[in-house]
Amino acid sequence: MTTTVLSDTAAIVRDENHFNWGAVFAGAAVAIATAFFLTILGAGFGLTLMPRGGSTTFLTLGAIWVLAAQAFGFAAGGHVTGRLIGQAVETKKEEEIRAGAHGLVVWAVTVAGSLALLAIVAAGGGARLHGDGPRNESSISAYWADILLHPMGPHDTARGEDLAQDKLEAGRVLAADLHPGNSAHSYNSDDLIRLTMKDAGGSYAQAESRVAYVIGEMRRELDMARKAAGFAALWTAFALLFGAALAVAAAISARWEDDKIGFSMKRRY
């Protein structure tokens, strides 16, 4: 009579610790795909990081959605990695440190991969997923140069190539006038008044009033653009910091879950 001994051990452990890059890249791929999908889904419903339509409120439902999408992606990636790295001959503390290190590297690889994808999309002229975003100084000055030289009423001044050149000049003057440390404000204003009288018509007082209005509105828009850019940078940094903590915690909790399954399941024959 032959006696067969069956082992109840469900998990196979390794004799030495090592870093599992395959699990890291798998988790990073899951994190990027999850965050990208949720961000795209939110953008379809108008939930974007930057406010639309000139809104002055930055902490919107869209910003919260983007944070949640990034957080869920990092958590999913950390969990997948924690389950894939497997068991090893180590103490509980060593296992948690190993899992946490894998989770942190998943976060780093995910951030690097996301930046690479964004660079590719930007180079290809792809649509932005974080909203309209603030306009830069050149686009702001070009827009207000058009407003500045718009005709005040019927007037016979030739508006051909000279107008196009004058708009370019007005845009450069406006950009220079709003640049920090500018010391030629009076000269710039006189130049803008001259261009306004030439291309838009009206009296000196009307041109002076329009120049003052345009400069004031342009300063307000530029200030809003700078505030929006600052908010986006701080919010993104907070999302990344929160994501790092989640990736580490998810990897460690995945190891706990794997240990429970490994020591509770019995091998089936």
Image (cartoon, rainbow, N blue to C red):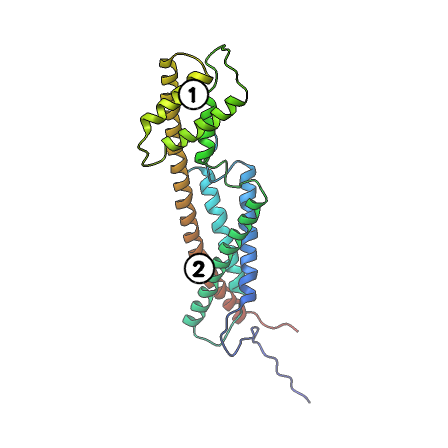
The residue singled out by tag 1 in the image is 195
Q: Report how far apart the C-alphas of labels 2 and 1 lie in the structure.
A: 62 Å
Query: Considering the numbered disc 1 on the image, is that residue within a helix, a strand or a loop?
Result: helix
Q: Quadrant of the C terminus?
A: bottom right
Residue, far right = 1
Question: What residue is drawn where x is 57% and y is 76%?
Answer: 8
Q: Secondary structure at mark 2?
A: helix
> Dividing the picture into quarters, in which one does residue 29 lie?
bottom right
Left or right: 36 in relation to 171: right
Is residue 7 positioned above or below 2 on the image? above
Image point (41%, 35%), residue name: 225
Determine the residue positioned at 37% across, 25% down. Answer: 215
Q: Residue at x 53, y 41 (%)?
A: 129
Work out whether 165 lies above or below 85. above
The residue identified by callout 2 is 249
> As shown in the figure, which amino acid type bears the numbered disc 2?
Ala
Residue 77 location in percent, x, y? 52, 57
Say what amino acid the circle numbered 1 marks. Answer: Leu
Q: In this orientation, does residue 54 appear? A: no
How would you rate the neighbour count of disc 1 (Cα within 10 Å): few for under 14, some for 14-19, many for 20 or more?
Answer: many
Q: Is the N terminus in the top left, top right, bottom left or bottom right quadrant?
A: bottom right
**Does 168 appear above or below 45?**
above
Residue 84, x across and y down, in percent: 55, 65
